[in-house]
Amino acid sequence: MHIRIAGSGLLLLSTLGLAACSPAPIADAAPDSTLDARADTAADRSTDIASESQPDSAPDVVDMDVATDVLDDIAVDSPPDSLPDSAPDAIVEAGVPYAFADFIGCTTNADCPAGTGECVTMVSLANAGDAGASVVSVASIFPGRSRPGVCSRDCTSDPGACGSLLQPVGEDASARAYTCQVVHAAASPYPTPRPAFPFSVSAAQMAAGVPFAALCRPSFGADERGVQSFCQSCTSATCATGVCWSFSADAAVTGADTGQCLPSCGAGSSCPSGFTCRPSGAQSYCFPAVGTCGSCADRDGDGRGVGHCSSRAVDCDDNRAATFYGATDACGPEDRNCDGSINVADTPGCTSYYRDEDNDGYGTGSAQCLCEASGLIRALRGGDCADTDGERYPGSGFTRPAPVDMNCDGNVQHVWTTIAFCETLSCFATGLGTDGWNAFAGGDVACGVVGQWGGCLGMGRACAFSARTQQCF
């Protein structure tokens, strides 16, 4: 018995008991009474449609044991408790389009109704690299399913691959497109947890991105038992039976903010494949396993993440839009360009430092642009002419009785250079005079040399001189 959608040409159920394609499974297991009712419905319809859906030689009576077995197969891949007592007969009745709340399980292509894709048992893995696996099994992505594959299409290399898959919904046979969704993410080439800086990463793997796999997902929200706006854009007021979730904030939206509608789960209900039941507050909801309902998981909106994002480069911190592989680095505790190091030389925003062994604030040699002083590379100024002598540097006010350049100007300068003006008569009579070197005892003397320094001691007194060593700078 062949059953087709009236007016749509899409095959819904093929060969109950004869062979071609198995029917589209429903999302959840139904009670035995429901399955029996469906089998009865299928049997009642067989006489009316057998003549137009089978060759003349086909039998007019459906084997009820076979019909029940097929319906059991439909339910076996689905969660056990989410189907209400009165399941819609649309799944088995001719002329009425179907909907489902999970992927259809399959073993071969013959198990997939027309329009639902092929039987996918292995999904290609993008960015795997030469040493990594190139495929990942559906059984490992969706553990716990009874069949090795799902009716879908691999969209890992091309998100547009889902364009030809359309799910008919409702009595008007309007169609909902499939969505390319990231369903698996392998380990990132940027290690988690992050080791201490610095550590090495593969530049090629970081540029290629996190390995991922993607499948074409039907519109689970089309099933009348689920949230009709499943994974659709929403506000807090338009997702009444679930939660409107912001993946960027990792929280339920409030007010007029927008997010995506996720259905509730827990006792009596479960999540479709690719989604996990996770608590948030007092309720639990079906969250996408890789953090997106679509083809790119990108929380911070910088165009980098996991999947078909605008850039495949690894985002090592998806909570900071300025942090990703290839970003402009900056001084600070964050690895903004995701290269495994921080605060290396010549990082934008760095400061020029000089080697300063005597710690007098002046250094020698060429400057190094660092985010912070490091060891002896600590002086903010250069030009030290004696980096082992803390009293000798540009602008130094220290003096010494030796022929040395204390202020690093390239010259040796005497501290005392004046010549005394002290006539005995004038000094005695007026007390006037000028202190300085005694011109009659050699005058200005060389650095470190002892000379006669003095002058008038005051009115009624004479000129007086004493020994002084010439200081230099």
Image (cartoon, grey):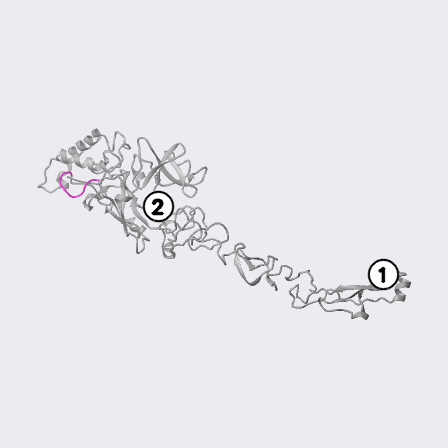
Callout 2, which amino acid?
Answer: Gly
In the image, 51 versus 155, the foreground residue is 155
Residue 379: image location, x then y, percent? 58, 58
- The tag on residue 294 is 2
Q: Tell me if label 2 and label 1 are in contact, CB under 8 Å.
A: no
N-terminal-most mark, 2 or 1: 2
Quarter of the figure that contains the C terminus: bottom right
Instruction: Please give the count of numbered marks on the rendered protein.
Output: 2
Q: From which residue to which does the magenta span run?
A: 16-23
Residue occupied by mark 1: 457
**Residue at 40% across / 31% down in the picture?**
282
Residue 182 visible = no
Where residue 224 sits, quadrant-wise, is top left
For residue 233, above or below residue 356? above
Q: What residue type is labelled 1?
A: Leu
- Local SS, label 2: loop
